[in-house]
Amino acid sequence: MNTAVEIENVTKRYGDVVALSSVSLAIEDNEFFTLLGPSGCGKTTLLRSIAGFEQLSQGDIKLFGDSIVDLPPNKRPVNTVFQHYALFPHLTVADNVGFGLQRQRLPSHEIASRVADILEMVQLGSYADRLPSMLSGGQQQRVALARALAPRPRLLLLDEPLSALDLKLRQDVRVELQQIQHDTGITFIFVTHDQEEALTMSDRIAVMSEGVLQQVGTPRQIYEAPDNRFVADFIGDTNLIDVQVTQVLDQCATCVLPGGASIACNNMAGASVGAGHLSVRPERVTLGPVDGSALQGEVSRLTYLGTDIHVTVALSDGGKMDVRVQNSDSAAIPQPGSTIGLYLDIAAARLLVD
Amino acid sequence: MRKPFDIKRYPGFFPITCLCLFLLYTPLIVVMVYSFNDSNSITNWGGMSLRWYEEVFYGVESQKFKKAAFNSLSIAICAAITATTLAVCAAMAMLRTGVFRGQTLSFALINLPLMVPEIVTAVATLVFFSAIGFKTGYASILIAHIVFCIPFAYLPIAARMQSVDATYEQAAQDLYATRFEAFRLVLLPLILPGVISGFLLAFIISLDDFIITNFVKGAGIETLPTAIFGSVKQGIKPSIMAISTLLLLLSVVFVTLSYFVGRKGQQTP
Ligand SMILES: Nc1ncnc2c1ncn2[C@@H]1O[C@H](COP(=O)(O)OP(=O)(O)O)[C@@H](O)[C@H]1O
Ligand SMILES: [Mg+2]
């Protein structure tokens, strides 16, 4: 497989603010790659660096093997779908979409046919002569996508393109975007702060926090085998239990839970003897009789979620555990106030160092 | 329940409004009306006539006034075009190059001429021209006008450019436009209402200027305001009122244009 983008040790400072701190990443050709992280973690800065709008403080960016850091934005075969679309308000939809083709000096009949094709693809064929201000948010988003795709870039950057859409539309557009990426074969770098969006759409995800890359992996790796507490906590819900690691032998760690029970764990992101954290997803905990359970607590709260019931259990040591019980299993739903035993799915529990 | 605050209900609101409007507009209306007076007197009404307009265009002094009008208009057009171009460049430098050292100082320097008393600028400009040995005449008037028109052109252009998000130009560059193409194809159309307002404002200011022009023009050349002043010194003739009315008409047309351009600009972001 070809590497589309290599980001090597990229650092970007704004005065004292470090927006990106030694980020290194390789993105494969034809990949749907997602940058995920909370607001302000440097996602936009990284995209703008690839597009050519930021002068790096340090590091190099290569596109298909060639360094592009010295090229101005208009010389990079990269297009961007901007966060608020930035559609040219004085140009019609067709002129917006044809803008890049015109700058590439394509013959006008080819521009016309390519614009028509791509507007057809995003189902806006009949809107060609409208101004962007006459379109709905979802339509503007599709024009922005069409405009960025029309010049057939080798790499498409999308900065939170769905954040301005309402929920229902967002779910439809997710599927459309994946389909378009698949059909065009263009490498996508997709930015979002929404972990669900990242999990459902991406081939691979890079999780960032405060300008530092935390973990890169497939949605499954990120969700089931987080490298650290930040990733475990940011992606989905999790219970982080403070444990004492007493022994590490052959990729198997012996952990002592707060209640004193001891368990053996072999799913870990590096472990050493001392304090550790056990991350257990709420759907990997089952409720049962107190006798023989690893942890015990009192049911403090039930939250109805439709398909699931979210059970909050107050542990005897002051901590709390979140448990998800399927709504179909009505026998397993406890009464608030009752004392109950918690059973961890040890194979799915992950031991984290930090 | 207390009535909400409404300035229109204050005692004296109506008389004060009337007084202000009276003081502002009566002189203008008198000049306009008496420009159509058939009598030689500037105070007695002698019936309707267009004789003073005829006098302006074909009378003994018509050559002098036509020449002055030509100077005024050509200087105003050249000065407004040049000042507007420089103002666009200044706005680009101020608003599109990020934060730089001395930004506030630059802003103050661009706008300071608005605060400096005009007579001071006039004296300073004259002293400057004579110090460098520049011959006074058409060129000296033009240069002086370009300079003092810049802040007037700058204000509406900068206000407009500030309201246009820099992301549009970045989107253009992202789509393979050079920096200049991004300016020409995206930023310029979006700030055009501001540019036109700036141009019209500079044009009117230049056309109307008396003090600076009078200082730097030298002998043998007149603009409309200096020619009118020269003529009035020998007594007010009704033909002056006709010229004034024509100038007023021109100003009204330009200000109205400027207003509508500005308003149209607000509708499209
Ligand atoms: N032009 C700038 N000047 C100063 N600080 C900036 C600038 N752009 C971004 N930052 C800072 O860099 C950090 C990362 O910003 P950004 O990349 O926009 O985050 P994200 O897109 O992940 O929300 C933030 O702390 C932000 O305040
Ligand atoms: Mg952002």
Image (cartoon, grey):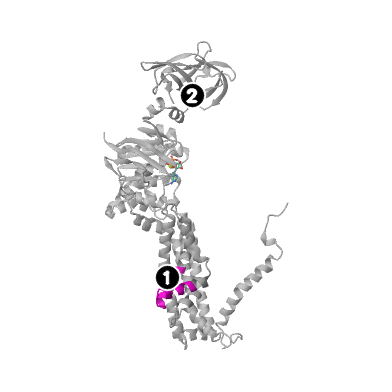
Which numbered circle lies on residue A239? 2
Q: Are marks 2 and 1 in contact (CB under 8 Å)?
A: no
Which residue shows up at 39% across the image and 22% down it?
A: A270
- x, y percent for residue B66: 44, 82
Element type at marker 1?
helix
Of circles 2 and 1, the one toward us is 1
Q: Residues within 10 Å of mark 2 (few under 14, many from 20)?
A: many
Which residue shows up at 36% across the image and 55% down it?
A: B182
- x, y percent for residue A231: 43, 29
Q: Residue furthest right?
A: B1
- x, y percent for residue A164: 46, 42
Pointer 1 residue: B79
Distance from disc 2 to disc 1, alpha carbons, whole Å, reads: 72 Å
Along the viewing direction, whichever of B236 and B41 lies nearer the viewer: B236
Which residue shows up at 45% across the image and 31% down it?
A: A234
Along the viewing direction, whichever of A145 and B128 lies nearer the viewer: B128
Task: Tell me the kind of residue under disc 1.
Answer: Ala
**What range of the chain is rendered magenta?**
B123-148
Q: Looking at the image, is A219 positioned above or below residue A340?
A: below
**Tag 2 subunit:** A
Residue B215 visible in this rendered orientation of the protein: yes
Along the viewing direction, whichever of A49 and B148 lies nearer the viewer: B148
Q: Is residue A241 magenta?
A: no
**Tag 1 subunit:** B
Q: Residues within 10 Å of mark 1 (few under 14, many from 20)?
A: many
Element type at marker 2?
strand
Task: Tell me the kind of residue under disc 2.
Answer: Asn
Q: Is residue B140 magenta?
A: yes
Q: Residue furthest top?
A: A291
